[in-house]
Amino acid sequence: MTLTIKEIEEKLQGYNDDEDSFIKLLENDQRKGVQRLLAQWKKKQEEEQKEKLRLQEMIVFEQEARENGATYIAGIDEVGRGPLAGPVVAAAVILPDHFYPAGVDDSKKLSKKRREALYDLILEKALSVGIGVVEADEIDRLNIYEATKKAMLTAIHSLQRTPDYLLLDAMNLAIHLPQKSIIKGDRRSLSIACASIVAKVYRDRLMENFSKTYPQYHFEKNAGYATKEHLEALERYGPCPIHRKSFSPIKEMLAPQLQFQLE
């Protein structure tokens, strides 16, 4: 019995082996519609295989840690070092073994829709997730580098499970745990990439909430970064309580006020 093109399309959904006898049968089917479906299926298989290989490359550091006896490996990353407003946010994520979510990458390379979908998946599947937040006033007091380290340490201490190994994106922490600092870790380590996604979505949602209190700065669109619209709002309204007073150009805006107070 010859299957219709619609039936073939439905049946192809369950196949992932190009050596399967059904696929061989389709290769000999002369109908143009069948060959179009087969070409689409093969392209999808190639893309899935390519993604699988990419993800395998992203678990090299996790595998190395497991081979050395680690069980709970936390990937840690931060978001928000550069903005003029809002907190710096860090996330620590401990993933289960054999969890390879398709599409995970450096959060900056993903669309908002994709980040949010992966955020939900990571929170659902992760063994533990910790968040660390350091607000603008403390960033001003500590400096952004020290504030970032504090956010990371807070995220680690917020984990429900104690990690026995840390993977960090180009950072070293003063903590008594084995750790590895990886340049461009959010692109090279699955755990760090997941942490970057969690931190990014969490911080973006914080900034969206701040935009309700301070709508003139459009934090829901710029997340506190120095966009043209944000800088124009700063010139017009001056800084608000969540702006970082130690960052330029805010520091220069406030300098005359500080000088006046001193006099």
Image: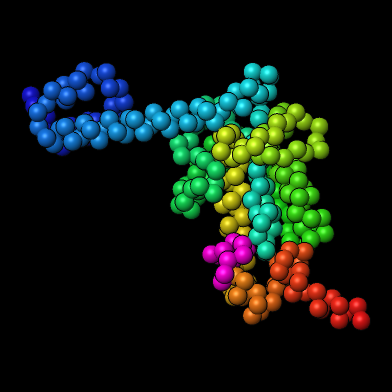
**Residue sitting at 50 percent across and 44 percent down?**
118
Horizontal side of residue 62 vs 37, given as left or right:
right
Q: Residue furthest left?
A: 1
- The part of the image, by quadrant, that contains residue 180 is top right
Count the labels in the image: 0
Can I make out residue 7 in this image? no
Q: Is residue 17 left or right of residue 30?
A: right
In this picture the colour scheme is rainbow
Q: Residue furthest right?
A: 263
Magenta residues?
A: 219-229
Compare residues 133 and 147 and report the one nearer the observer.
147
Residue 167 seen in the figure:
yes
Quarter occupied by the N terminus: top left
Residue 99, percent from left and from top? 52, 30
Q: Is residue 68 magenta?
A: no
Looking at the image, residue 1 lies above or below residue 131: above
Q: Position of residue 227 (x, y in %)?
A: 58, 66
Residue occupying image coordinates x 39% and y 28%: 49
> Residue drawn at (68%, 19%), measured in percent from left and top?
69
Q: Is residue 5 above or below residue 21?
A: below
Pick the front one: 121 or 166: 166
Place residue 158 in its image quadrant.
top right
Residue in the image at 49% along x and 48% along y: 110
- The C terminus is located in which quarter? bottom right
From the viewer's side, name the closer residue of 179 and 92.
Answer: 179
Q: Is residue 221 left or right of residue 175?
A: left
Q: Is residue 142 above or below residue 31?
A: below
Where residue 91 sits in the image (x, y, percent)?
Answer: 65, 44
Return the x and y of residue 75 as percentages of the image width and height. Answer: 64, 36
Looking at the image, residue 80 lies above or below residue 23: below
